[in-house]
Image (spheres, rainbow, N blue to C red):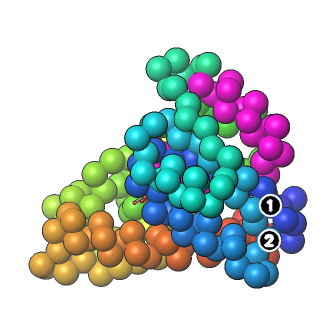
Amino acid sequence: MEKLIGRNLNISVFISGRGSNLLSLIKYSKNKNSKIKINLIISNNKFSKGLEFAKKYKIKHFIIDYSKEKQAEHKIYGYLKKNKIDLICLAGFMKILSPGFIKKFKNPILNIHPSLLPKYKGLNTHIRAIENKDKFSGATVHVVTPKLDSGKIILQKKVRILKSDTEKTLAKKILKIEHKLYPAAIEKILKKSSL
Ligand code: GAR
């Protein structure tokens, strides 16, 4: 990660659905002093709503057929190299990258996850936090490693879980903080060597 400090970064965002985190990253990249550029968007789902943002902001995007994972990753790897991507940001990408792919792509891969990791890796994080009667939940940006949702944590932010919260209201609150957290995590990587 050290080699990313202070650099201009070419970023590829991987999505599967709505793409609201993608939009927040695009907006952040458009800031006057931003050092990042979103050059490439990858989606495994042709119906992903996030692809509309790719079109709106004229960002190169590819839909990858994931029925054969090895071929899919081979294709993605080619696009990453061709577009000189320094950093991958997974943003609601619902496929698990293979250990081989993570190893081969020498630059960092980040993910945003809707829980206070290491709590609630995997899916259905909000309902698990509510059922467990947790007082807080939140979101985490972490480095992707072959072990699911277990890489180094870059930034995390908490929200309080109210008695009245449902899976839907909690998800909404957390999504709102995610939109600030992902850009802040990238800022941190660009500035600090403590990763
Ligand atoms: C976000 O809440 C993100 O944290 C979550 O999917 C949502 C995507 O929303 N990611 C995961 O659950 C990954 N395991 P978006 O498509 O609007 O950015």
Q: Secondary structure at mark 1?
A: strand
Residue 18 at least partly seen: yes
Quadrant of the snapshot with the C terminus: bottom right
Identify the residue position indicated by label 2 in the image. Answer: 35
Residue range of the region highlighted in magenta in the rendering? 72-94
Residue 28 shown left or right of residue 140 in the figure: right
**Foreground residue among 152 and 85:** 85
Extreme-left residue of the structure: 164
Identify the residue position indicated by label 1 in the image. Answer: 9
**Residue 158 belongs to magenta span:** no
Residue 182 at least partly seen: no
Q: Residue at x 67, y 37 (%)?
A: 102
Question: Where in the figure is residue 29, as x and y percent of width and height?
Answer: 69, 70
Question: Where in the figure is residue 137, as x and y percent of width and height?
Answer: 33, 71
Q: Residue at x 62, y 66 (%)?
A: 26
Tell me if residue 67 comes above or below residue 11 in the rendering: above
**Residue 73 belongs to magenta span:** yes
